Each structure stands twice: as C-alpha cells, then as structure tokens.
Image: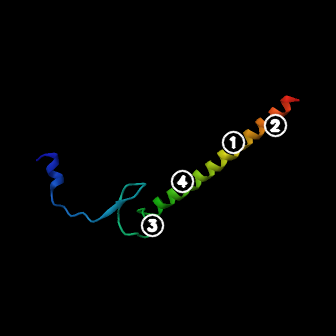
Amino acid sequence: MSKYDQYKSKSTVFPHKHCPKCTKMVPEEEGEFGEYCSAECAGFFKTQKKNKKKRTFLFIGLYGVAIIVFVVLAILGNN
C-alpha cells in the first residue's frame, strides 16, 4: 500500500476547525469557547493580546519621550 492509498480510504470526518493554540479538532459551529478547544487556550490568547497592546503603548510612549529629549537637547545646544 502506498502513502497515497491511505489517504484515499473512505473515512468519515465531520466538518471541523482546529484550535489556533494546540491544533486539536473543534466542531465548526461556535461552541462554548468560540474557535478554541478549551478555556485555557482561549485565555492564553486573551492574555497574549493584552500583552501585545501594552508593549505597543510602551513603545509609542518611549519613542515620544526620546523625541522630546532630542528636541530639548537640540534647542539647548543652539544657545
């Protein structure tokens, strides 16, 4: 039997999606946890999203402070 023949077999697979975190099968219809297989996987992505937002604001804030310092030093250097 070739590798291809094992995929040709008539197996019944119900329509499904895969959890973005752990890749377990999840039914297509929205379940208790949405597109995730469990509360643990859903919580992981929620905290990851919060952390990304915090990092973005921190980066913007630090960039703004650096620009202000540069402008102040440029003004004081011209005197």
Q: Tag 2 or tag 3, which sits nearer the N-term?
A: 3
Residue at label 3? 33
Q: CA distance from mark 3 to mark 1?
A: 37 Å
Amino acid type of the residue that numbered disc 2 sits on in the rendered structure: Val
Rendering colour mode: rainbow
- Please tell me the numbered disc located at residue 72: 2
Residue at the spot x=13%, y=46% of the render?
2
- 60 displayed left or right of 24: right
Residue at the spot x=27%, y=65% of the render?
14
Q: Residue 60 location in percent, x, y?
A: 67, 46
Q: Is residue 33 above or below residue 19?
A: below
Crowd rating for badge 3 (residues with CA inside 10 Å; few <14, some 14–19, many 20+): some
Amino acid type of the residue that numbered disc 4 sits on in the rendered structure: Gln
- 66 displayed left or right of 52: right
Marks 3 and 2: CB-CB under 8 Å? Answer: no
Crowd rating for badge 2 (residues with CA inside 10 Å; few <14, some 14–19, many 20+): few
Q: CA distance from mark 4 to mark 3?
A: 16 Å
Between 77 and 34, the one lying in front of the other is 77
Q: CA distance from mark 4 to mark 1?
A: 22 Å
Query: Mark 3, mark 2: which one is toward the viewer?
Result: 2
Q: Tag 4 or tag 2, which sits nearer the N-term?
A: 4
Q: Residue 31 location in percent, x, y?
A: 41, 70
Marks 3 and 1: CB-CB under 8 Å? Answer: no
Crowd rating for badge 4 (residues with CA inside 10 Å; few <14, some 14–19, many 20+): few
- Helix, strand or loop status at disc 1: helix
Q: Residue 3 location in percent, x, y?
A: 16, 46
Amino acid type of the residue that numbered disc 3 sits on in the rendered structure: Phe
Query: Mark 4, mark 1: which one is toward the viewer?
Result: 1
Q: Tag 1 or tag 3, which sits nearer the N-term?
A: 3
Q: Residue 22 location in percent, x, y?
A: 40, 54
Image quadrant holding the C terminus, namely: top right
